[in-house]
């Protein structure tokens, strides 16, 4: 499974008109001193308002000219917009609901874990067919994201091998309908891109599956098996 996220992490808008207003206001009220009286405030405030009112907002033509002089701010994209974290998670949830039953996004994992004990080898066989993932970003953790995937069909089969005897397996336990969860570190990859002859810095954010932690809901595994399962899934992916 390969997932790539590309988005703008932070933007800064420079409002020239607003900055000009703040500078004029600060300059006018600095004349009041550190402890201005109410009378002084009333006498100076109209002057400040008069000066501020003369600073007209730019026309649409002037604004376009200013934006053109500023240069590209979209890194070559046609449209750039900002979304809050709650909005991003909501959009990802809507996308998940629309695609979770689409078999085009079906994936399969077949992994085994094996633990050696004196005279006995314990084997767990995992077969997981999972669908489109629900990606969620956490408010309290900006370094990782969570993937929740519904297991369309699958099983866990527990086996054992005593000495040189053949492997003996119990009946598979059905895990269809359970959740396959992955907590994945976000990897930040810096680079350069060339747009219209100019070089721009870019930052690509990727899910680093090799550093993920994987689990299956309602499956009782001992700590050693959990470690083996995580390592096997990472190697498989």
Image: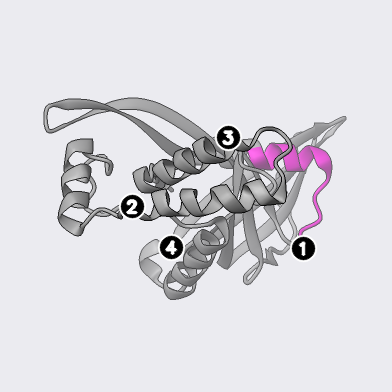
129 displayed left or right of 182: left
Residue at image mark 3: 31
In the image, 31 versus 195, the foreground residue is 31
| Dot 4: element | loop
Q: Nearer the viewer, mark 1 or mark 2?
A: 2
Judging from the image, what secondary structure is the residue with disc 1 in? loop
> Mark on residue 218?
1
Residue 54's disc number: 2
Residue identified by numbered label 4: 106
Does the magenta-highlighted stretch encompass residue 226? yes
The percent position of residue 104, horizontal first and vertical second, equals 35, 65
The quarter holding residue 205 reads top left
In the rendered structure, which disc, 4 or 3, sits on the residue that comes first in sequence?
3
**Mark 1 crowd level (few <14, some 14–19, many ≥20, 10 Å Cα):** few
Mark 2 secondary-structure assignment: loop
Between disc 1 and disc 2, whose residue precedes? 2
Q: Position of residue 144 (x, y in %)?
A: 61, 42
Q: Which sits in the foreground, 36 or 179? A: 36
């Amino acid at each position: 499974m390969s997932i790539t996220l590309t988005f703008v992490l932070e933007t800064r808008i420079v409002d020239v008109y607003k900055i000009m207003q703040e500078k004029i206001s600060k300059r006018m009220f600095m004349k009041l001193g550190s402890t201005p009286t109410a009378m002084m405030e009333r006498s100076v405030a109209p002057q400040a308002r008069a000066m501020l009112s003369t600073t007209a907002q730019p026309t649409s033509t002037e604004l376009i000219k200013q934006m053109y002089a500023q240069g590209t701010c979209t890194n070559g994209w046609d449209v750039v917009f900002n979304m809050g974290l709650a909005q991003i998670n909501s959009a990802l949830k809507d996308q998940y609901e629309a695609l979770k039953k689409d078999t085009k996004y079906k994936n399969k994992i077949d992994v085994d874990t094996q633990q050696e004990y004196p005279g006995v080898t314990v084997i767990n066989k995992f077969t997981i067919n999972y669908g489109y993932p629900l990606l969620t970003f956490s408010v309290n953790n900006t370094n990782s994201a969570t993937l929740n995937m519904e297991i369309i069909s699958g099983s866990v089969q527990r086996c054992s091998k005593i000495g040189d005897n053949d492997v003996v397996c119990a009946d598979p336990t059905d895990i269809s309908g359970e959740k396959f969860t992955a907590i994945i570190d976000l990897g930040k990859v810096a680079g350069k891109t060339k747009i219209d002859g100019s070089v721009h810095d870019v930052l690509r954010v990727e899910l680093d599956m090799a550093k993920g932690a994987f689990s299956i809901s309602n499956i009782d595994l001992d700590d050693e098996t959990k470690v083996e399962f995580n390592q096997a899934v990472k190697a498989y992916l």
